[in-house]
Amino acid sequence: MQPQILRDSTSLSQALRSRRRALGLTQEEVGQRAGVAAKHVSRIENGTHEPKVSTLFALFAALGLDCVLGEQGRVVRPPDITEIF
C-alpha cells in the first residue's frame, strides 16, 4: 500500500474503508480487532461519526496501518536501511 496524504475526515473515512476491503475484512471483524461495535465502524466509514483519537489508533492497529505526520509538501518515505542500523 502506498502512503496516502489525508487532510480531512472524509478522506480518512474512505481510506479506512478501502484498507478494510483490501484486506477482505468485514466491519464486524475490524470492530472485534479494534474493540468497537461493527455499527461504530460503519458510522466512521460513512463519515456520520467522528471517532475519538484512541478509537482511530485502535482502527489503525486493526488494519495494520501506521499514522505518520510530516510537513505539508514533503513526500513521506520509509527510512533508508542505513538509517535503521
Image (cartoon, rainbow, N blue to C red):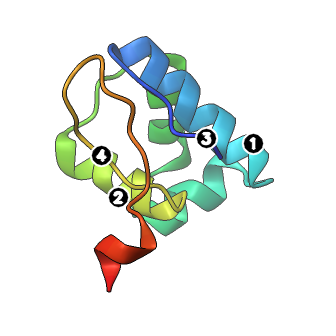
Nearer to the camera, 69 or 8: 69
Q: Which amino acid does label 4 sit on?
A: Val
**N-terminal-most mark, 2 or 3:** 3
Image position of 31 (left or right of 77): right
Residue carrying label 4: 68
**N-terminal-most mark, 3 or 1:** 3
Q: Mark 3 and 1 residues: CB-CB less than 8 Å, in contact?
A: no
Q: How many residues crowd mark 3 within 10 Å: few (<14), some (14–19), many (20+)?
A: few
Res 49 → quadrant? top left
Q: Which of marks 2 and 3 is in front?
A: 3
Residue carrying label 2: 58
Q: How many residues crowd mark 4 within 10 Å: few (<14), some (14–19), many (20+)?
A: few
Q: Residue furthest bottom?
A: 85
Q: How many residues crowd mark 1 within 10 Å: few (<14), some (14–19), many (20+)?
A: few
Q: Which amino acid does label 1 sit on?
A: Arg
Residue at 73% x, 54% y is: 25
Res 76 → quadrant? top left
Residue carrying label 3: 2
Compute the Cα span from label 2 to label 4. Answer: 15 Å
Residue carrying label 1: 21
Compute the Cα span from label 3 to label 4. Answer: 13 Å
**N-terminal-most mark, 4 or 1:** 1
Nearer to the camera, 16 or 40: 16
